Image (cartoon, grey):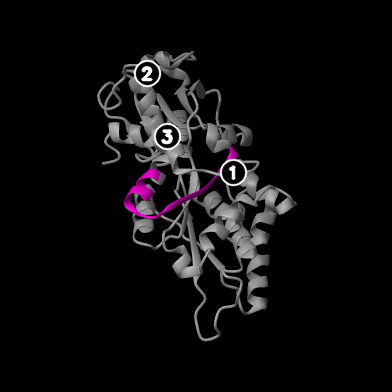
Amino acid sequence: MHTSSGRSPGLPLSLAALGLATALALTACGEPSDAAGGTADAGQEAATLRISAIPDTDPSDLAEREDALAAYLAGELGVEVEYVPVSDYAASVNLFGTGDLDLVFYGGLTGVQARLRTEGAQVLAQRDIDEHFRSVFIAHADSGLEPIEDVAGLSGLADTRFTFGSESSTSGRLMPSSFLSEAGVDPAADFDGEPGFSGSHDLTIDLVESGSYEAGALNEQVWAARLEAGTVDTEKVQAVFTTPEYADYHWIGSPGLDERLGEGFTEDLRQALLDLDGSDAEEEELLAAYGAEAIVPAEASDHDRIEEIGRELGLIR
């Protein structure tokens, strides 16, 4: 439950305070600097950097995290920064493709989809944990499912009532589907009825915990965070398998950044992300909100495997 202030108890108060403080600082300055280090002309409206993220978790938590990132970037880059929420994964890819979003925190699959649709889009950075990401398969206590030792053991999930997360989720659909296929389970035909698509990792947990589905798959980070927060009834739902590693989330910048915000802005933005190193309390809390300890370089080639699997599953055409 959220407090009356609208702040999620999972994120520190200073993240919200950071946004307010930066907004006040920019207002006081009156003339936000452009990417080249100058100031906006008095007669021109300052360009705004529009950031977003796929809606893979609680909307309030997501908004607070992204607002805090917006405040950090505004302070580092001297431009107005706005968090733009999106309704679903597909909307995020579509809005990025039409130029309505400038910087998006994507999962592996949606990042590949966005780059393929938007010529000139650039992978800018990733969290340290995204180099070695994993999914978790969970099961209801009444399902009869026991802990699974290896990928081949996922064959035991055949004939269960099963839910994925979003249809476009890397950790909640794409990679679990790939591992299931490796175990000889056809995700489209071998469950008890058609698989569900909860829409988010949190809802996957809730649906399996309630017994609506016997099993499901989700982002390991969300599962760990929910366990730590004590918002999972471990008498009703438990993890039965953690997958091998793969590359996942990353930030992508639009091809029009330098044109809209000044020559060299894309590289300035990349560096601002990489400079988020936890060197002060506010940065440390922002990184914690992302479940990370550092932001590290990333390349498009990191997600070649994601693209290959996406094409095999018909999620990339």
List the residue tagged with mark 2.
157
In the displayed structure, 283 sits above or below 179; it is below
Label 3 amino acid?
A: Gly
- What is the CA distance from the residue labelled 2 to the residue labelled 3? 15 Å
Mark 2: few/some/many CA within 10 Å (<14, 14-19, 20+): many
**Considering the numbered disc 2 on the image, is that residue within a helix, a strand or a loop?**
helix
Dot 2 and dot 3 residues touching (CB under 8 Å): no
* Residue 166 x %, y %: 38, 40
Mark 1: few/some/many CA within 10 Å (<14, 14-19, 20+): many
Dot 1 and dot 3 residues touching (CB under 8 Å): no
Q: Is residue 120 magenta?
A: yes
List the residue tagged with mark 3.
172
**Considering the numbered disc 3 on the image, is that residue within a helix, a strand or a loop?**
helix
The boundaries of the magenta stretch are: 112-128
Residue at horizontal 50%, vertical 27%? 245
Label 2 amino acid?
A: Leu
**Considering the numbered disc 1 on the image, is that residue within a helix, a strand or a loop?**
strand
- What is the CA distance from the residue labelled 1 to the residue labelled 2? 36 Å
Q: Is residue 278 left or right of residue 90?
A: right
List the residue tagged with mark 1.
296
Q: Nearer the viewer, mark 1 or mark 3?
A: 1
* Residue 36 x %, y %: 57, 70
Q: Nearer the viewer, mark 2 or mark 3?
A: 3
